[in-house]
Amino acid sequence: MVVKMSRQSDGVSWRWLLGSLLVVFGCSCSGGSSSPDARITIVATTPVSGATDVEPNTVLGLSLASPAQTLTAADLIVTDGSNRLPGTVARVGSSAQWNWTPAGELPRNTTITVALAGQGIVAVFTVRDTLVSVSVELPLEEIDTALSWRNGRSALRTRNGRVFELLQGSFELVERFCTMPRGARAIGDGRFVGEEDEAGVHYIVRGDLTGNYDRVPTPSGRLLGDVNAAGDVVVLVQAFAGTPAEHGLWRLRHDGVAFELVGPLSLLGVGDRPSIEADGTVSIAWSDNGLPRLARFAPGDLAGQRYETGLDGAIQPMAFEVQYDASDDGRGVMAFLARSADQTRWVVRAARFDPASGLQLLPQELRSRLIGLAPTTTLQVADVTVGDQGSAAVLMTLASTSMEGLRTIRSEVVRVEVDDSIGTPFEVAETSYVPWPQGQPGGPPPLVSFGQVRTSPGRAEVWGMTRLPSSSPMTLKLSRPNGTHSTPVYSFASNRNYGDWAFTFDDSGRGFYAVVEWELLGPLIGTRIVVLE
């Protein structure tokens, strides 16, 4: 501890210093003694330290040394290896027993650490893995969208526009008569935000499972950017669309009826999805002369703030595909592709943003690839997602083309934890397609999906569902702070054909996987839903 003292009065300064040390280290002097019971001590926990396969809905029991001691949520630090888990504490009667109840179920397949601010770690246990539970049939319907909410609710939309909620516990499908766009995003409790086109106009659609519905046209017909937990949305109008007065970031609050320009910017070729925080602050990242830049506009500040990260000697100022995201509290992560200083490697680097300290480059690389190793293979930074507690997932793609013209895109994920440690990249999905022949009219054909990537609502965990064109089972791959994990979740039947498929999950790892099934060379059977819990 470093203490700076004033020279106004040496006597006052030393008395203040002595008092400070007594507060920090304790004192048994007469007149200022501190009761031994004032220090909180946990003597036992349930689950006990070392327990395995703990149920996700477990309430943590804590036995204090004395009934005179009082425990608060601020005293207790419960983490999953990176994120601090929110929860509430309550005394059991007037005893020394206290319970900590997590805000949501404990995340599956994680190691939970329980610590007390003044005592240190008191217990470490692991939560059981995701289980393949039951199979639910939805006859004669083809799924096209699946989504989950933070409280465990989940629903699906079919190609016919019908919406079904999967009830927890009973695993029943209940039809909800509401208008949900394909690819909608879940917000709040049973609410969603999506997009649709009609008569040449692009709309943001807002609705819920009870049937409420409205839509607002987007500025210059631009696509939706980020959506925060409340349902506020942001749209970027780049310099090739609209008028100069319309260029920049536009915001629509969840209770608003029209977009408003909140961040005037004239940008071209920006691939970053603009971000919006809980208070309505919006941000966007891009490359300017090879340097990654960040602009952030707080409510009422049309001038905004600009940030740039200093580059260390390991990389050159040649940043491409800059991606950025921020959590609702304003903490963010930027990832970008650059070249190594010796020009032999492509490297992916990251920077952490904090509203109080600005943008700071992280020293460790996220990924690298030799330049010229395979000219047909390219490394790209595709997206960044930051969770409620500050950890982030960076999605990267490696695209390659075979001699036969088959284009394959492998999606990889690397985690940036709250303490800025970098995880190991791992593949979560693969997609392949054959490009259109030279001179063929129209755009490229639709992708033949061998995998999908989804992100949890609040924890910024990327899950990938991978399957191969064979009898191999489908595998669920997920990113957790304690590493990568894979679970087989679906097996093919030899007497059926398979069509579209989708999956969804909440922050604890509960959700479902659904696939469209057809009789072999025959009619549509429907959608089979495999519940994960």
Image: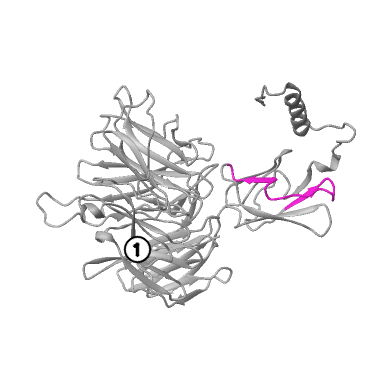
Q: Is residue 80 magenta?
A: yes
Tell me which amino acid carries mark 1: Asp
The magenta region covers 61-81
**Label 1 Cα crowd, 10 Å radius (few <14 / some 14-19 / many 20+):** some
Quadrant housing residue 196: bottom left
Against 263, residue 532 (above or below) is: below
Q: Quadrant of the C terminus?
A: bottom right
- Residue drawn at x 58%, y 47% is 110
The percent position of residue 391, horizontal first and vertical second, equals 50, 44
Q: Which residue is mark 1?
A: 500
- Residue drawn at x 27%, y 58% is 222
The percent position of residue 203, horizontal first and vertical second, equals 30, 66
Against 29, residue 333 (above or below) is: below
Asked if residue 370 can be seen in this view, the reply is: yes
User: 249 left or right of 489?
Assistant: left
Q: Quadrant of the N terminus?
A: top right
- Residue drawn at x 30%, y 46% is 409
Asked if residue 498 can be seen in this view, the reply is: no
Q: Main secondary structure of the magenta part?
A: loop
Q: Nearer the viewer, residue 505 or 343?
A: 343
